[in-house]
Image (cartoon, helix red, strand yellow):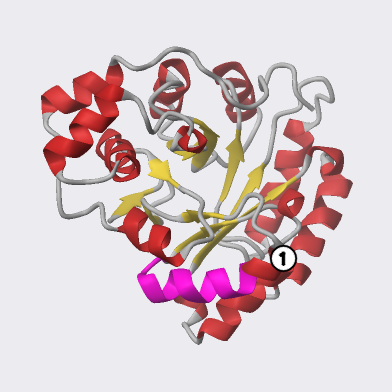
Amino acid sequence: MNLSMNNGHQIAQLGLGVYKVAQTDAVTLMREAIEVGYRRIDTAALYDNETQVGQGIRESGIDRSEVFVTTKIWNDRQGYNESLKAIDESLARLDLGYVDLLLIHWPSPAQDLYIDTWKAFEKVLSDGLVRNIGVSNFQPNHLDRLIANSEVKPVVNQVELHPFFQQHDVRSANARHEVLTEAWSPLARAGKNDNPVLQQIAEETGKTVSQVIIRWHLQLGNLVIPKTTHRDRLEENFKVFDFALSGEQMEQIASLDSGMRLGPNPDEFG
């Protein structure tokens, strides 16, 4: 299932995240994911596996145009000139010709460089080195300020988002700007798979808790990138298009929001 971004380009709603995927696993994982049907891969300079992700995609034999690859620039490479260097380095490591989506990994407000960084993003976009540009972990005030000071609007804002941290304010701000919301840590790192509400819905649907959560994201309109290194889990996470959650089940999951943030606060990090 594809969604349209605010520039008219399409993006697959379900992809694969590779945070903390070891270099030794990443090449094989790319080949297996593509065999299963994944066509969108999310990596980052921080993950230290861009080289292996690119190698695995090339070795899969799939046409480059059929795989949508996201990467991100880390906090210590912000600023116009430094970002341009970092982007060149990511392009070289991936060795895929271009990047489909480039994200500012964190706003790092203490540095106050994300607008300068975005200018570099706009340049590589106009140069054709990347096809789409966006942000990650941007709070509404960061997003508002960036858009007010830019020529090109972000297409995506990737943020921590799961049933226990539903990010209503961020999702509303994204929607107001026609920016798609993408969920990282979408399964809450499997830390709540024993939740009785989720287990009950899994029993009602004949699916696993992970499949229920991924389906919840899809029905909300989120982009979602669950991570795994296991072939059976790759297949499980991808089998979410043959059922739907009822309105009541969606409301039950909505009631789980507890403000449980697993990662850093973007207002304070970086």
Q: Residue at x 44, y 55 (%)?
A: 15
Residue 52, quarter of picture: bottom right
Is 35 part of what is drawn in magenta?
yes
Q: Quadrant of the N terminus?
A: bottom left
The x and y percentages for residue 19 are: 63, 50
Vertical comparison of 59 with 29: above or below: below
Q: Nearer the viewer, residue 138 or 206?
A: 206
What SS does tag 1 mark? helix
Q: Nearer the viewer, residue 43 or 226?
A: 226
How crowded pointer 1 is (Cα within 10 Å; few <14, some 14-19, many 20+) is rated as: some
Magenta-tinted stretch: 26-38
Q: Nearer the viewer, residue 197 or 87?
A: 197
137 horizontally vs 204: left or right:
right
45 horizontally vs 21: left or right:
right
Identify which amino acid the numbered label 1 is placed on. Gln
Q: Residue at x 79, y 28 (%)?
A: 270
Vertical comparison of 43 with 157: above or below: below
Q: How many marks?
A: 1
Residue 198, quarter of picture: top left
Vertical comparison of 20 with 147: above or below: below
Is 33 part of what is drawn in magenta?
yes
121 horizontally vs 188: left or right:
right
Residue 58, quarter of picture: bottom right
Q: Residue at x 60, y 76 (%)?
A: 56
The residue under label 1 is 23
The x and y percentages for residue 253 are: 27, 23
